[in-house]
Amino acid sequence: MHETVLVTVTGLDKPGITAGILHILAEANATVLDMEQVVVRDRLNLGLLVGFAAGNAPLKDLLYFGWERGLHIDFEVVAGADDGPTPTRFAVTVIGQELTPASLAGVADAIVAGGGNIERITRLSRYPVLSYELLVEGGEMRELRSKLLLASSAHNVDVAVQPEGLARRAKRLVVIDMDSTLIRDEVIDLLAEEAGVGDEVRRITDAAMAGAADFTEALRRRVALLAGLDEARLAAVAERITLTPGARTFARTLRRLGYKTAIVSGGFDIFAERVRAELGLDAAFANRLVVRDGRVTGELDGEIIDGPAKARLLAEVAAQEGIPIEQTVAVGDGSNDLAMLSRAGLGIAFNAKPVVDAAADTTLKVPYLDAILFLLGIRREDIEAADRESTGS
């Protein structure tokens, strides 16, 4: 006859505690059914679910081991290990400029309301934003997402929920929109200012990005208004482009981790290629602006990179790299990104229009692009360690 005991160890962390306890269990021919450990500010919390032959649990040995090291050790006899199906698990990521007890309580309440239970909490970052990853057992994806969206809105924090498993941690390709995502600007608006048609173009841009106008028609109308713009002004506009905060860290970290990266933009190739080269990304796809005799003609050459084209390019790049579509990430902000976000394994709406927020898997409102790394389970400490290794410091 066997019994199952939950052994809980708490106290000041020191080297050798886990090894010592496991040696005691080994001498008693125990079976370790489950084990989890976390250290917070040098305080240890170790839990072991252990199977013993009846009457053979080395409780006195464990208590003496704990007494010698100033540890508190508790025992609880529990039901046998569950041999049933593995319960559904989700990773819930909470991100904010500030995460108060009230906001975290709101997220926890939403998880309970969605039928889930928090099993583990891990801090991902302290800056430039605070973020935590919550491992949740139970619940249903749609219901959890619905409840968490309400908590996100009520407490002004970003909350993302994803199925937990190998697929989430095996992403290998990130495809990202450029204007108002990778960079803070809408390049066509900058060009329009140079051409003296800023207000008219901006109105068309806003309608197109909000989904109130057909993207291709709106793009052709805006480009036509640029006819006659001196080619030298394109270089001037390129100098005005501002990267989104965190873009360099985002690109650098993905490159070091072996991700493939591509810009897929409804903007223009001249600028997309410049940004690609500056950030060291692998590829860039964008509309080709026609320049003839030193002036913009107001025309585009070749296929228009609209919403369906973005989704197709995502799939083509993935196929070329031998990457399953489930292992891709797409990031964008406008309605022309919706098809791409929907097709990717993970679609992220970054500071996006409301129509995009409502449809995307995950939304981020913080102004830092590298916060996307936290959705992939990458911790800030890992990013900084990689930076130190690359500089040899």
Image (tube, rainbow, N blue to C red):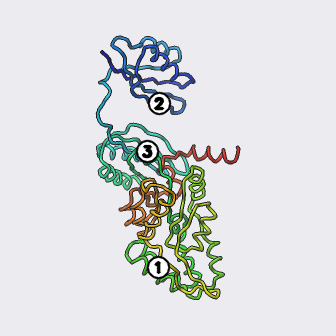
The answer to which of marks 2 and 3 sits earlier in the sequence is 2
Q: Residue at x 29, y 33 (%)?
A: 84
Q: Residue at x 37, y 39 (%)?
A: 118
Question: What's under tag 2, amino acid-wise?
Answer: Gln
Residue on which the image places disc 3 = 166
Q: Secondary structure at mark 3?
A: loop
Question: What's under tag 3, amino acid-wise?
Answer: Leu
**Residue 37 disc label:** 2
Tag 1: Cα neighbours inside 10 Å, few (<14), some, or many (≥20)? many
**Residue 219 disc label:** 1
Q: Secondary structure at mark 1?
A: helix
Marks 2,3: beta carbons within 8 A = no
Where residue 18 appears, as percent x and y from the top left, is: 51, 23
The answer to which of marks 3 and 1 sits earlier in the sequence is 3
Disc nearest the viewer among 2 and 3:
3
Q: Secondary structure at mark 2?
A: strand
